Image (cartoon, grey):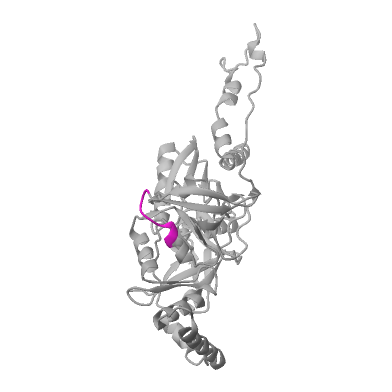
Amino acid sequence: MPRFTPLLKGISLGLLLVGSGIANAQDSASDSTAHAQLPLEELRIFTDVFNQIRVAYVDEVDDKTLLKNAVKGMLSGLDPHSAYLDASTFDDLKESTSGEFGGLGLEVGMENGYIKVISPIDDTPASEAGLESGDLIIQLGDKAVRDISLEEAVKLMRGDKGSKVTLTIVREGQPQPFDLTLTRDIIKVTAVRSKMLEPGYGYLRIAQFQGETGENSYDEVKKLIKQNKAPLKGLVIDLRNNPGGVLQASVKVVDNFVDQGLIVYTKGRLKNSDARYSATKGDILEGAPIVVLINGGSASASEIVSGALQDHGRAVIMGTDSFGKGSVQTVVPLNEDTAIKLTTALYYTPKGRSIQAQGISPDIEVKRAKIETFESARRLTEADLSGHLDNGNGGDENNGRDRAARDSSSLVKDDNQLYEALNLLKGVNILHTQRG
């Protein structure tokens, strides 16, 4: 059984966490540290502190608890994503791999001691309540979350279906913190879905990267082509608020649309942390244009996909800057009950860009906005005049007016970013058609 599981995401609340194994890195780690000298002075200080707590702390604490807390501190002090998984947290992780449990549908991380929302997940209590990427959670019920561990916060937010929890939120642009009361639910995430926006133009929504997301994405695009009864003229891939997932799934998604070349590579201290992933021959869209939508909730595996398609010149990236999580976490079981989640590598786009703490910048920035359309007053046209000359098109003088009357108001009001993506695809196709 492989010991390491590479992940490209943080702690998930009600999120199906799917991993895939890579080679055992313990031997390499042992080799690299075999001749390293231990810092004796620091070990002496640790021993002194350990003994002081045992003897003088106001409440008696057993040695096992002290040592476990020391391990937690070592990991939490490294970065926001490394963590010690005790029996309960490790069970949650294994449970989320296969299943369903009561939660809110949030991907979260730590920032300055508070819980930061990376992304709400589609069709969950978190998304329905209006939580946004970048929100800071400063209180859970009556418990302040300042400096509690991420795992403790996760436990507080999980619970039985139907139970309620109140989150106190700080949001940029809001003058005061505000409360949101959410009702926990059984979280079932549909990772991939699709639809036709208009004849010839498809929409592929990837909510997260699970083990089969690459294959499912391929199948959904095939379904769109069959539904269109012809090759697609263009495709919108929606990665907004997608917090990431399995690295290999993101590679497969890119491979669906890229014919050749490097997709992503990882670099770490251990030899088996270094890996390169390249495309295989075949583009399911046969070169049809792609627009990828991203925002501040698009993280890790989402950034691999958007970065690779951008570097290959295969897609136009539209939206706002992504989250900027460019690291790979590996789950290392310590025994049957506990494990550690350790950052073991950084990943890079085909052109060598590190996304860590920087993210992907869109080619065309389009912020989410509320847009109101205005109906034009009814005007007299040439076609309304009695005795107007025939245009020679078989009496279709009003076709232009009919096209203008097609109702696109719903899309522009509901999702202006998607509306702009569709318009861009149309424009590209008009130019290609005009140029033959």
321 or 381, nearer to the observer: 321
Above or below, 205 relative to 411:
below
Magenta segment's dominant SS is loop
- Using residue 80 as the reference point, say whether residue 62 is left or right of it: left
- The image quadrant that residue 358 belongs to is bottom right
Above or below, 333 relative to 362:
below
In the rendered image, the quadrant that contains the C terminus is top right
Is residue 206 visible in the rendered image? The answer is no
Instruction: Tell me what residue is drawn at x 47 percent, y 90 percent.
Output: 34
In the rendered image, the quadrant that contains the N terminus is bottom left
101 or 66, nearer to the observer: 66
Q: Residue 396: percent from the left, percent from the top?
A: 57, 17
- The image quadrant that residue 312 belongs to is bottom right
- Is 31 magenta? The answer is no
Above or below, 127 relative to 150:
above
Is residue 58 visible in the rendered image? The answer is yes
- Using residue 232 as the reference point, say whether residue 427 is left or right of it: right
Above or below, 112 relative to 189:
below
Q: Residue 17: percent from the left, percent from the top?
A: 40, 60
Q: What is the residue that sits farthest to the front in this orientation?
A: 58
Q: Give the range drawn in magenta.
A: 155-162
Q: Residue 381: percent from the left, percent from the top?
A: 67, 15
158 or 97, nearer to the observer: 158
Q: Residue 187: percent from the left, percent from the top?
A: 39, 51
